[in-house]
Image: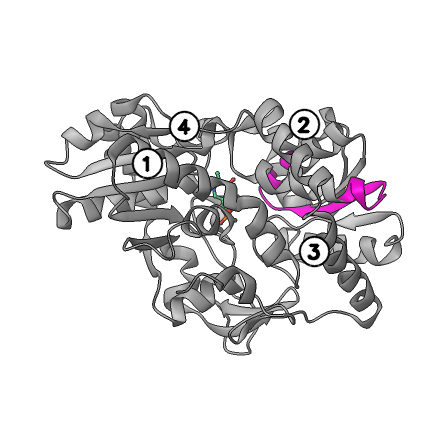
Amino acid sequence: MNTDYFKNFPDQNGLFGEFGGSFLPPALVEQFKDITHSYLTISKSHKFISELRSIRKHFQGRPTPVYFAERLSNSLGGARIYLKREDLNHTGAHKLNHCMGEGLLAKFMGKKKLIAETGAGQHGVALATAAAYFGLQCEIHMGVVDIEKEHPNVIRMKLLGANVIPVSEGAGTLKEAVDSAFKAYLEDFETSIYCIGSVVGPHPFPMLVREFQRIVGIEAREQFFEMTGELPDNVIACVGGGSNAIGLFSAFLDDPCEIYGVEPSGAATMTKGRPGVIHGFKCYLLQDDDGKPAQVCSIASGLDYPGVGPEHSYLKDIGRIKYVTADDYECLEAFYTLSRVEGIIPALESAHAIAYALKLAKQKKYQSILINLSGRGDKDIDFITEKYGFTLEEMKARFK
Ligand SMILES: *Cc1c(COP(=O)(O)O)cnc(C)c1O
């Protein structure tokens, strides 16, 4: 890696090596150019930077701490585990980092409405929060199946003033919701802006979302160094689309740290996918024999995506980051363990990163491991306890 990495990746066409780019309907090409231009000018202005800083501090509650998980570490026989506490960010996860950036950009661009899709509802809630803060309208497209499944998040979005649009086409889940949100944006691009939920989608979104998430890594690197006088030996995060991961990893690309992105075994895009195009960009993609995006399945709905960010696809190919997997059982083990041992209930997504760290700790006996705890687990507790009970032992007995 070198120091001008962030200037050159993505390049002017939005490419990270062969990945990324923008595959758009002709009517949207100019709109996306306009978003790129606005982002590259507005977000570098003093006014934008100081307003975003103030929001981070006073509304979101940043910086979030880095925490030494002492009891968990003691149970491992030598390795030291540190958690970057994105679960303590307002709304309980890292997603607000880019949603506040997207909302502020919309405000500076004079837009009136934010449009997006949501799967499990996490992005919808974070974006509805940003819209409420900036006094913008918010339209969230969501599959009817997901609306049924993720009821508490639908309530939250409505309380925050968002208009939740049910999408009944196809399977009624995330993919159809994306198509529907794109269509709505196409009809209303003068007054609205499309706000994607991760480092995915057509250029400039993988870049824009990365830049808004870099705060996680910038804080964590400084905090870790201040606590220990060293840099972490290993850095770990879970990867769905890859926004919390790239946020943390981006600060360590030039450092002598091993970096691991953890995917669920049921949506292991990086280990089992091959290059393809989805939702307007090229990336590693799980696809069936006809090249269509495959059905994926993970206990963590936030990681249930057959594609992955183009930058992760590139960083895999050049060998800078290792992409590994954790399965549902390992994720649950980590979920119960962190809750009981440290008093922190993690999101099921984040529990994948913890799970891999627990494996790694056995091989890297006297090393430090910094994990991005991307979100808190409140949203998962009803589902988990009804299905698996309240203790690790009960879970082990019930798991099939
Ligand atoms: C959405 C979500 C993720 C996955 O998204 P990325 O873009 O891969 O970060 C991970 N953790 C939590 C808590 C989430 O809500």
Cβ–Cβ below 8 Å for labels 3 and 1? no
The answer to whether residue 343 is left or right of residue 208 is: left
In this image, 207 relative to 260: left or right? right
Disc on the earlier residue, 3 or 1: 3
The verdict on residue 107 being magenta is yes
Against 185, residue 346 (above or below) is above
Give the mark nearest the N terminus, 1 or 2. 2
Residue at left offset 47%, top offset 52%:
246
Magenta-highlighted residues? 106-126
| Residue position for label 4 | 65
The 10 Å Cα crowd at callout 3, few under 14, some 14 to 19, many 20 or more, is: few
Q: How many marks?
A: 4
Q: Residue at x 32, y 23 (%)?
A: 390
Circle 2 residue: 155
Q: Amino acid at mark 2?
A: Ile
Q: Which residue is mark 3?
A: 40
**In the rendered structure, which amino acid carries the disc numbered 3?**
Leu
Which comes sooner in the sequence, label 2 or label 3?
A: 3
Label 2 to label 3: alpha-carbon separation: 35 Å
* Image quarter in which the C terminus is found: top left
- What amino acid is labelled 1 in the image? Phe
Instruction: Write down the residue under mark 1.
Output: 224
Asked if the residue at tag 2 contacts the one at tag 1, i.e. Cβ–Cβ closer than 8 Å, the answer is no
As measured in the structure, the alpha-carbon distance from the residue carrying label 1 to the one carrying label 2 is 37 Å
Q: Position of residue 138 (x, y in %)?
A: 78, 38
Specify whether residue 400 is in view: no
Q: In which quadrant is the N terminus drawn? A: bottom left
Taking the spot 53% from the left edge, 76% from the top edge, the residue there is: 18
Q: Secondary structure at mark 1?
A: helix
Q: Earlier in the sequence, mark 3 or mark 4?
A: 3
